[in-house]
Image (cartoon, grey):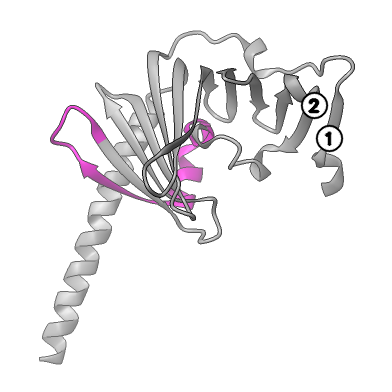
Amino acid sequence: MRSDIGFFIFLIVYSALAHASVASDELLKLLDNTHSMQAGFIQKVSDTKGRVINQTEGQMAMQRPGKFRWDTKKPTAQLIVTDGKRLWIYDPDLEQVTIRFLETAAGETPALLLSNTNTTLEKDFRIEEISNHSTTRWFLLRPHDQGSVFALIKLGFVNNQIKEMQLQDRLGHMTAIQFNRVSTNQNVSPALFAFKIPAHVDVIDETRRLH
């Protein structure tokens, strides 16, 4: 009897791992086919009761691996840019620029993970496919690191293009990002991923603290 129980436990675990492996391969294939992306976005943050407490709109651009631009236009302007090594956060209203190393800034905007390499995603997340029967194909990502900002992330694809992200933080707040006017695998200007610090702004360079 004991060996039978062990067999069924092994079968359940093996089946789960095999399913996770297939889901991981499918998601990474979708992402790997997206070398670059430009889109508009609407981002809504909801509290634990589902009430929207913050909404922003803007434009984004991404080029794998590691290059990313998140340009919030409404209601308050903010620009986040990374060249794959350093990340700049520019708040025009505050006349302030913050500089960080990319690896320390994952929580600045959740969509940053779209520019990650497949190796990084496989290392950092357990991946499941949770829906392939509707117009949107959903994947669930659970971080291996229990100290990560987000408890779970969902990626929604329509016609093999990313259309929506849903992210739940450790406090139960939900961030939903919807992409519109999506353009993939087109030429993206390198200037979008470069940042020149404006004159007469305060600069907080957190990279110097790490040397």
Closer to us: 128 or 134: 134
Closer to us: 201 or 14: 201
Closer to us: 51 or 66: 51
Distance CA(mark 1)–CA(mark 2): 8 Å
Q: Is residue 72 visible?
A: yes
Given the image, on which type of amino acid does mark 1 rest?
Answer: Ile
* Residue 205 as seen in the image, left or right of residue 116: right
State whether residue 49 is above or below residue 7.
Answer: above
Q: State which tag comes first along the sequence, 1 or 2.
A: 2
Give residue 73's quadrant in the image: top right
Residue depicted at x 45% and y 15% = 39
Q: Are marks 1 and 2 in contact (CB under 8 Å)?
A: yes
**Magenta-tinted stretch:** 112-137
* Residue that numbered label 2 is attached to: 96
Q: In this view, which residue lies farthest toward the bottom? A: 1
Q: In this view, which residue lies farthest toward the right? A: 200
State whether residue 142 is above or below residue 1.
Answer: above
Q: Is residue 211 visible?
A: no
The numbered disc on residue 204 is 1
User: Residue 198: percent from the left, percent from the top?
Assistant: 82, 15
Given the image, on which type of amino acid does mark 2 rest?
Answer: Gln
Magenta span includes 136: yes
Residue depicted at x 17% and y 37% = 132
